[in-house]
């Protein structure tokens, strides 16, 4: 699949995190421009891609904002520590596919560049 995709895994429950709200913004100098919004599906993935391959701006800096606070409050997993989790990244020249996974609990998260 090409373009920008993401998925969220709930490490407390050991399964995909369905229903997580995601906002994608592009940083344009001091301003941020909202590019897309999505909610993860039952597999914890965005469907369709957040951004098509031809819309990925080489050298562009983007931020994914994951609403983990609402997700974990709804699951009863407790927490209240994490609310909106930002993941900022820059698109390298020639990139046509970029996958940004998020592994999360109510108290911590990690991410990496997926394939």
Image (cartoon, rainbow, N blue to C red):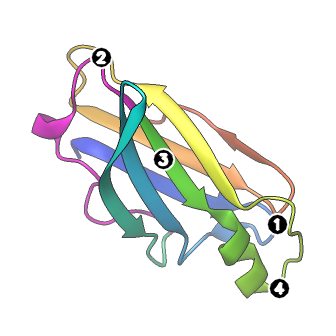
Q: Position of residue 61 (x, y in %)?
A: 39, 27
Q: In the picture, residue 67 is in which quadrant? A: bottom right
Q: Which residue is mark 1?
A: 12
Dot placed on the residue nearer the N-terminal end, 3 or 4 = 3
Task: Please name the residue shown 79% across and 60% down the image.
Answer: 105
Q: Is residue 4 left or right of residue 43?
A: left
Q: In the picture, residue 48 is in which quadrant? A: bottom left
Say how many tags the image has.
4
Q: In the picture, residue 72 is in which quadrant? A: bottom right
Mark nearer the viewer, 1 or 3 = 3
Magenta span: 44-61
Mark nearer the viewer, 1 or 4 = 4
Secondary element at tag 3:
strand
Q: Which residue is mark 3?
A: 64
Badges 1 and 4: C-beta atoms under 8 Å apart?
Answer: no
Per the image, is 72 magenta?
A: no
Distance, label 1 to label 2, CA atoms, is: 35 Å
Question: Callout 4: few (<14), some (14-19), or many (20+) C-alpha neighbours within 10 Å?
Answer: few
Mark nearer the viewer, 2 or 4 = 2
Q: Which mark is residue 21?
A: none
Q: Position of residue 49 (x, y in %)?
A: 27, 55
Dot placed on the residue nearer the N-terminal end, 1 or 4 = 1
Secondary element at tag 1:
loop
Question: Callout 3: few (<14), some (14-19), or many (20+) C-alpha neighbours within 10 Å?
Answer: many
Secondary element at tag 4:
loop
Q: Which mark is residue 76?
A: 4
Q: Which residue is mark 2?
A: 59
Distance, label 3 to label 4, CA atoms, is: 24 Å
Dot placed on the residue nearer the N-terminal end, 1 or 3 = 1
Distance, label 3 to label 2, CA atoms, is: 16 Å
Task: Please name the residue shown 63% across and 60% down the image.
Answer: 9
């Amino acid at each position: 699949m090409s373009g920008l995709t993401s998925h969220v895994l709930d490490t407390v429950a050991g399964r995909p995190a369905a229903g997580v709200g995601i906002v994608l913004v592009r940083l344009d100098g001091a301003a941020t421009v909202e590019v897309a919004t999505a909610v993860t599906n039952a597999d914890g993935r965005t469907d369709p891609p957040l951004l098509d391959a031809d819309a990925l701006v080489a050298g562009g800096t983007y931020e994914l904002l994951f609403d983990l606070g609402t997700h974990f409050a709804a699951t009863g997993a407790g927490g209240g520590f994490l609310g909106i989790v930002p993941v900022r990244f820059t698109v390298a020249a020639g990139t046509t596919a970029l996958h940004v996974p998020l592994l999360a609990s109510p108290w911590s998260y990690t991410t990496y560049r997926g394939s």
